[in-house]
Amino acid sequence: MKTVSVTSIIDYRKCPKFYQYRYVDKLRVPPNANMVSGSVVHGVIEYVLSKDRSLWGTLENIAEVLMFKEFAHRDDARTQVTKYLPGVLRALSKVPEWVWERTWHVEELMEWTYRDPNCPACLGAPPVTGGAVHTAHCNAVTVRMKPDLWLVEDGVLDIVEFKTTENDPLDYLLFNAQHQFYAIGLMKEHPDMLVRFRYVCLPTTTKKAGDHIPWVFTTNAIAAAREELVQGAVDVGSKMYMNRGFWCKGCEFKGLCMTVLTGGDERGMMEEMKEVMP
Ligand code: SF4
Ligand SMILES: [Zn+2]
């Protein structure tokens, strides 16, 4: 059965070529300062929430250690840490109190499987000799996901994602289905719970945090998101084309696409990118 991650579904829907470069060709560019800051903020929150609280260092210590690790491949690691640590600490200072106070499942990897209603093997038909065989057109797919935080309390399933850019949480809800996909996955174990989710935006700039009351996942929204998730998972990797749009501006592979579009050969460049980060 095909297995895909929520991140790859979202990347594929944004741009199939991006998906190809990242997941098929496995190309990487060294992370830029924004990516490093974002992953350090996530790392600190994860560390603090999942360790024995008596082992805590200060947020500043943990952030500094994680940041050095991220910049380890650079000769100017200390300069980079000095430059970007204040932004990370600014973002961390905006984490709402309720995050630290509750007991969460933190960045746990989980799987959700869709079974094709038109496939006898998926429906659990008794195995014929040699085992049940999925039909040639079986669309069954397993989706991997790793929500930032979730917990179940008083019959409510709460899901939280952090973002370190300045966007409004409502914008994220619109242009990233990630959160609702996680909810679909988590509902497998908690089918009858009220599901609430929220994005907490923790900008590294001086802008204030984008925190908000949680949204309730309504029955209609659940049905729509489920359909979107299944279709997204089934589609992943089926075609590879450049889906050019405003997101190209911030894309790590834009050099490659520019080369192709201007009549160049991207293969040499791809080889180099494989060497940078094997
Ligand atoms: S630059 Fe644009 S077209 Fe090229 S991979 Fe990135 S998002 Fe896709
Ligand atoms: Zn099947």
Image (tube, rainbow, N blue to C red):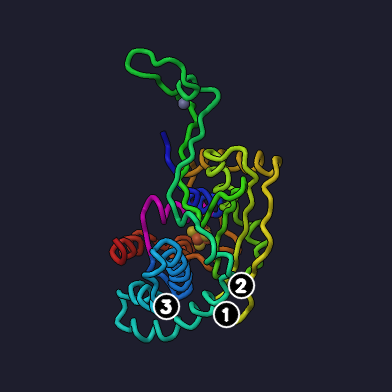
Residue 21, which numbered label?
A: none
Residue 168 in view in this figure? yes
Quarter of the image containing the C terminus? bottom left
Residues under numbered marks 2 and 1 in contact, where contact means CB atoms less than 8 Å apart = yes
Q: Earlier in the sequence, mark 1 or mark 3?
A: 3
Q: As shown in the figure, which amino acid type bears the numbered disc 3?
A: Thr
Note whether 172 is above or below 210 in the view shown. above
Note whether 7 is above or below 39 in the view shown. above
Residue 17 in view in this figure? no
Disc 2 element? loop
Q: Decide which of 185, 192 is in the foreground and name it.
A: 192
Q: Residue at x 60, y 60 (%)?
A: 245
Tell me where the magenta segment starts and ends, as one range.
15-28
Quarter of the image containing the N terminus? top left
Location of mark 3 (residue): 58
Location of mark 1 (residue): 205
Disc 1 element? loop
Mark nearest the camera among 1 and 3 is: 3
- Position of residue 2 measured from the top left corner of the image (x, y, whole percent): 42, 37
Location of mark 2 (residue): 166
Circle 1 Cα neighbour tier, 10 Å, few/some/many (<14 / 14–19 / ≥20):
some
How far is mark 1 from mark 3, CA to CA?
A: 21 Å
Q: Is mark 2 within 8 Å of ligand 1?
A: no
Residue 23 in the magenta stretch? The answer is yes
Q: As shown in the figure, which amino acid type bears the numbered disc 1?
A: Thr
Q: Residue at x 60, y 55 (%)?
A: 176
Circle 2 Cα neighbour tier, 10 Å, few/some/many (<14 / 14–19 / ≥20):
some
